[in-house]
Image: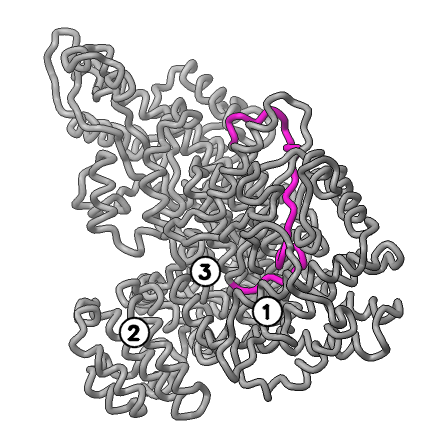
Amino acid sequence: MIVSATLGPGGPDQVVSKALEAAAHSRFVQRIRRRYHAELALLPPGPPTAAAMRQTLAALQAGGLDTPAALRVLRHLVLERLAVLDVEHEAPLALVTGAMTDLAELALDTALQVALSELDEVHGAPTCPDEALAATSATAANAKAAAGWRRAELWIVGMGKLGARELNVSSDIDLIYVYDQDGETRGNALGRGRISNHEYFAKAVKRIYSLIGDNTEHGQVFRVDLALRPNGNSGPPALSLDALEEYFLVQGREWERFAWLKSRVVAPQQVLDTDHPQALRALVQPFVFRRYLDYSVFDALRSLHQQIREHAAKRAAGNPGRLNDVKLSRGGIREIEFTVQLLQVVRAGQFPELRTRATLEALTRLVRAGLMPEPKAVALAQAYELLRKVEHRIQYLDDQQTHLLPTRDDDLGWIAQTLGFADTAAFLCVLDAQRELVAQEFDTLLGAGALPCNGKGCNGHAPAAPSHDWLTVLAQLPPGLGLRVAQWVESPRVQGLRESARQRLLRLLQRTGAWLEEGRVSEGAALRLCDWIEPLLRRESYLALLQERPAVHERLLRMLGAAQWPARYLLRHPGVIDDLAGQQLYQERFEAPQFEADLEARRQALAAGGDDDEEALLDLLRRAHHAEVFRTLARDVEGVLTVEQVADDLSALADAVLRVSGRWCWQRLKQRHRDEPRCAIIGYGKLGGKELGYGSDLDIVFVYDDPDERSSEVYATLVRKLINWLTVKTGEGDLYEIDTALRPNGNSGLLVTSFDAFAHYQQNRGSNTAWTWEHQAITRARCVLGPPDLVQRFEDVRLAVLTAPRSSAALAAEICAMRERLRQAHPVRAGLFDIKHSPGGMVDVEFAVQHLVLAHAAAHPALCANSGNIALLHAAEHAGLLPAGVGQAAARAYRALRQRQHRARLDEASTQIDPALVAEHSAAVRALWAQVFGSVDCTAPVGPAALPTR
């Protein structure tokens, strides 16, 4: 989805054709044409591209202008051209802002080269150790030799609109100067004038400012603002990477994360295509984007925005016209930017595909990520384009850095006309509507305008009273919850909280207590919330999330109250709770193609920033997997999904994780000898039968079919790498436990087998052949991933195994004996019924179905389908292999037993229960067993001593 920001200003009757020479209304354009009439022709026709600007700058210098004067004249020529293209030819907004950004980058690069050249003559080049060269030196003396030193680099970091390539036509430029290492200069030709790199670059900053910021007879190139640098106007003009890192760690404030979000190295030009600025990016990214969902920035942005609105109100106190500021007033450009940046800062730590600087592109990515409805994003994009175009026209008038609508009627009429409106009234009507839309969206996001909180179940964001103390809150809580919370009063964890976090905690407890009294949540849920939140108290973002999102708070309580396992899962993976915010959570199902596409987009986003190392990809897979498990869990406990649907979705998730992990492992395998691997993963057990539960391990077998002589070694390396990717525990946890015991010859066999050897083993060719229990296992095996031809060959082998001629009596005896061994391995307490292992339990159904398939699939092809036990029971009854009603009754019993087992596991309760609770279902399963096996002897030998106990 691409957000379109094409604005229809209010209907066809309001759109008029634009007059030629409309740009001539601009008093600034008039001045340029009078003073620089001869120079205007130096700028090549058409949009002012970076190449055209460089050509024009060279021509101006060749005409006798020095560099500062040439840059200033170039600016005038570019602005005159942009005014014409914009107001007379409807140039896209991106063309105008892009050209202004190109101009700024050219000016900064030119000024930087001049400044460095001048300083080098006086002080020599700034130097620092070349770590790459020094590392190869044999001695310390060699490390200090000239070959071990290099020139220290100064990077000009563009912030705000410059960083995002969104400069307006009369914008100042927000800059921060960073150099890579401390050191000292070499000195001039006489060896004199040595100074520290810090002093050298401070002089460079001063000179650059003079070259582009001083007012001369030709004006300025750009106004320069350094206030965003660390410690603001009291900070050093340039700072080293080490100093910047320390500042981020010790003093970096929340609002600065928004400022650095759009940062970009804009000069010098020659380093932009190198990896040198990567060291700066490595500092900025973790400062701006936290690894968890970071709702603590809401308060910081509220505070910052409140200051901006208060400042705007003070300025307007004596001049009501200042309320018509299209940037800073209510519903202005800044509120659109804040809306977008807030969602990015909160989410982009975990979702790198959201990391982009440009506002319109960010809106598009927010829609793709499902974080903003498309109609809302389109509306904000339309408002943004209109407000930016109005801003430009305001500035074309007199080249003033203002965002106030003009008070002169002719100027307002000109703006309306050049935007395609019939008159000023039509323009102002649409402008007001767009600003109101923006303001409402922004206020909704920040929760502004909420009713004051009285401390009892308030869904707002701030209490009426400035603070709460523990005694007051404890007095308001129901007894059970109050007793649990009272344990926190003296807790070091709680006492160590910052005041803001303590207030958040108290408000959450008040809200929980009020909901408990109202009957909206249970006491068990409230107590489990305390258990969940206590170890997370120092991670204040979770307190902020629950405070900011009352709907998340309430749904979390419902989940915690539903069962014990969700509470334990949330404790291991607390970051997933943000998914509770949207109602669409309960209206959707897992979609593997979208899941894989999202993962690939995130990997590409990481790769674009050079951050796609193995650890980052492992964490990326784990976060995505945990989030999807949680979404399925949320739908499960709310009763949206059946047990079968839960199993289907968890199995589809495992398939997708295996596909993505396998693909990424192969791409990063040093020994790979072809673009696409010739191997396959065969899923057995619950994965093969699409019956996975929460926390199930994966029974898988690896096979390959590749004539290359290196193939066995290559695929063994791939399999070991893949298993490690799936099982290793990182800071984000693990994915799955892997069991490969069902491969040919079990744990004593090769980890990865050639497909021919696998086929011979399964089809009893040669002396090394499969046991009956392995044929039982293949009844519900399937190829999870692999080349299409290999997938089909596996299906052919599976079909051959299922339809092979075999003695029904001998088969029944072996299966019955295996069943007896499993029963002995899982003893049941006297007087209880084990849902899975007792006679009449789930395993009896599974073994009966496996016998029906292996004994009768040759005559009844419908039994070959890997369609699950319930469907196969119906197929067997339809084929006449079971008396009427026996298969259906057993199918109903199996479904009911699965539901009980599933519920018990969610509650972390025992699956050994009172037999009376399932007497009807157990009887139906016993009837099935009697029909299939009759009085078969269950003591016959079945194979090797160490059998899988599934």
Residue behind mark 3: 339
Residue 332, x across and y down, in percent: 45, 60
616 vs 204, nearest the viewer = 616
Residue 554, x across and y down, in percent: 45, 79
* Amino acid type at image mark 1: Gln
Res. 787 in view: yes
Are the residues at dot 1 and dot 3 in contact (C-beta closer than 8 Å)? Answer: no
Q: Is residue 248 above or below residue 583?
A: above
Cα separation between marks 1 and 2: 27 Å
Residue 43 lies left or right of residue 134; in this view the side is: right
Instruction: Reply yes or no: does residue 13 show up in magenta.
Output: no
| Colour setting | one colour
Q: Does dot 3 land on a helix, a strand or a loop? A: helix
Total labels: the figure holds 3
Res. 421 in view: no
Residue behind mark 2: 504
User: Badge 2 local density, few (<14 within 10 Å), some, or many (20+)?
Assistant: many
* Amino acid type at image mark 2: Arg
Which portion, as a residue range, is magenta?
Answer: 669-694
Residue sitting at x 26%, y 22%: 131
Q: Earlier in the sequence, mark 1 or mark 3?
A: 3
Residue 713, x across and y down, in percent: 55, 27
Residue behind mark 1: 584
Q: Earlier in the sequence, mark 1 or mark 2?
A: 2
Cα separation between marks 1 and 3: 21 Å
Residue 651 lies left or right of residue 398; in this view the side is: right
* Amino acid type at image mark 3: Thr
